[in-house]
């Protein structure tokens, strides 16, 4: 835990695909003075495949700039008004409830309905089956999947005249390889994957993916969860064995299947992409988890009156992933004007940082260290949100390549074996 007023180093990597050679380290003061309960409301059912929530309201204040800060005056704070209903298909508990509720209505003029998915594969399958009639106005895919979605005709181009606040995004998070001109996507946030465990049940030091796999098969057998995605499930094996998780080598894939199906699967209790709630309910003693949900787990444990000191978040070695999720507008969106207006509003600094404080992921804003110091000086667990250069140097970008179908096959076999 970062101590009060201890400087925190934050990294903005230049590239998610190539060796990191350009690094920006920032420092802020006033970090995480003590603990605060993170809101567990909103976001909907953790059963992401069927979860749905209607959010809205007539109260709340605008998320626009206060106009009283020299820093904020350097950002574009255009808020476009829209009207009607806006439907978003996204990851579980991925936005501050007010930002998809009362503030969306009062600031942008829209009432939002939000549905949730557990994986990019699930998102793409549903959009493909809908053939342009999904009913969704906004989707939030991970960058590596965007070229496939463009090729399949699942995304429509932005009207950039309606997104003037795109200039607020740090150039490091623009013009990614998956969309070099940002015609279809803009950064929502980025993060990584680690694990969360109960130190009273797993008493040995835990620092690597091999530690995770071994503990799942021993102390946490029948009491552990993995993310409900094929790449992450197999990624744990590849990272533990010094293999880049984008491997297309048939021998690597065969070895992964043999280990995960024949040795590991029987120990898995659940496939859960958002395990923080179940952790607080005592369902797991060890969980693979995205960093923002790991941060949320601490808050839920506190909210339940449990001892957070018994739990530990780990960013494992020797390698793990780095991902960026992106706002996109699907083909056939019923209300594209409202989609542009809401995304543009999210790209104002005050709204972006408010959202960051809820979901716990780096939102890609310019000068984010200064924004945090001004807008969220008491941000809780910042060390789970912002990574050092040494940590980011261990992170690997994912890829959608010739191994994708095989990874899904392995995932299906593991799931069947675990259920049996």
Image (cartoon, helix red, strand yellow):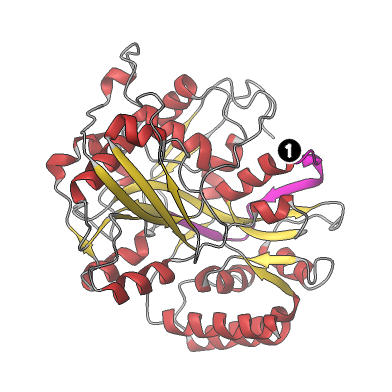
**Quadrant housing residue 387:** top right
Identify residue for label 1.
302
Residue situated in front as seen by the camera: 223 or 315: 223
Is 84 on the left or on the right of 250, as rendered? left
The residue tagged with tag 1: helix, strand or loop? helix
Please tell me whether residue 210 belongs to the stretch shown in magenta: no
Residue situated in front as seen by the camera: 234 or 392: 234
**Screen quadrant of the C terminus:** bottom right
Indicate whether 63 appears above or below 195.
above
Q: Is residue 224 visible?
A: yes
Q: Is residue 386 visible?
A: no
Give the image location of residue 411, x and y in percent. Answer: 56, 80
| Segment colored magenta | 302-323
Give the image location of residue 166, x and y in percent. Answer: 24, 39
Is 151 on the left or on the right of 127, as rendered? left
- Residue at left offset 57%, top offset 30%: 8
């Amino acid at each position: 835990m970062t101590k009060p007023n201890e400087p925190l180093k934050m990294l903005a990597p230049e590239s998610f695909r190539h060796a990191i050679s350009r690094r920006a380290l920032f420092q802020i003061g006033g970090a995480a003075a003590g603990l605060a309960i993170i809101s567990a409301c909103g976001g909907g059912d953790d059963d992401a495949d069927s979860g749905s929530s209607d959010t809205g309201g007539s109260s709340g204040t605008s998320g626009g700039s206060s106009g009283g800060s020299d820093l904020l005056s350097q950002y574009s704070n255009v808020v476009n008004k829209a009207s009607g209903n806006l439907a978003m298909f996204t990851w579980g508990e991925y936005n501050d409830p007010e930002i998809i509720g009362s503030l969306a209505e009062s600031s942008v003029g829209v009432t939002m309905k939000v549905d949730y998915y557990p994986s990019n594969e699930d998102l793409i399958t549903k959009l493909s089956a809908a053939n342009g009639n999904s009913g969704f106005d906004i989707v939030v895919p991970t960058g590596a999947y965007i070229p496939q979605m463009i090729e399949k005709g699942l995304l429509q181009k932005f009207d950039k005249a309606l997104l003037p606040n795109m200039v607020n995004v740090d150039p490091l998070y623009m013009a990614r390889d998956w969309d070099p001109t940002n015609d279809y996507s803009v950064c929502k946030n980025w993060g990584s994957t680690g694990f969360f465990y109960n130190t009273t049940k797993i008493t040995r030091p835990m620092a690597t993916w091999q530690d995770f796999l071994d503990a799942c098969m021993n102390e946490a057998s029948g009491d552990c969860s993995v993310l409900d995605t094929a790449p992450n499930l197999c990624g744990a094996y590849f990272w533990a064995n010094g293999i880049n998780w984008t491997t297309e080598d048939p021998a690597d894939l065969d070895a992964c299947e043999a280990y995960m199906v024949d040795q590991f699967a029987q120990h898995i209790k659940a496939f859960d992409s958002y395990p923080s709630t179940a952790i607080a309910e005592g369902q797991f003693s060890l969980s693979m988890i995205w960093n923002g949900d790991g941060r949320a787990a601490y808050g839920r444990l506190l909210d339940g009156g449990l001892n957070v000191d018994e739990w530990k978040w780990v960013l494992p070695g020797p390698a793990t992933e780095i991902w960026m999720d992106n706002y996109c507008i699907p083909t056939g969106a019923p209300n594209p004007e409202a989609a542009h207006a809401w995304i543009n509003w999210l790209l104002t600094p005050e709204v972006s940082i408010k959202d960051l404080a809820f979901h716990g992921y780096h939102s890609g804003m310019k000068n984010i260290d200064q924004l945090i110091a001004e807008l969220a000086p008491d941000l809780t667990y910042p060390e789970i949100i912002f990574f050092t250069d040494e940590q980011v140097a261990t992170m690997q970008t994912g890829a959608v390549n010739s191994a994708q179908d095989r990874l899904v096959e392995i995932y299906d076999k593991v799931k069947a074996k675990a259920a049996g």
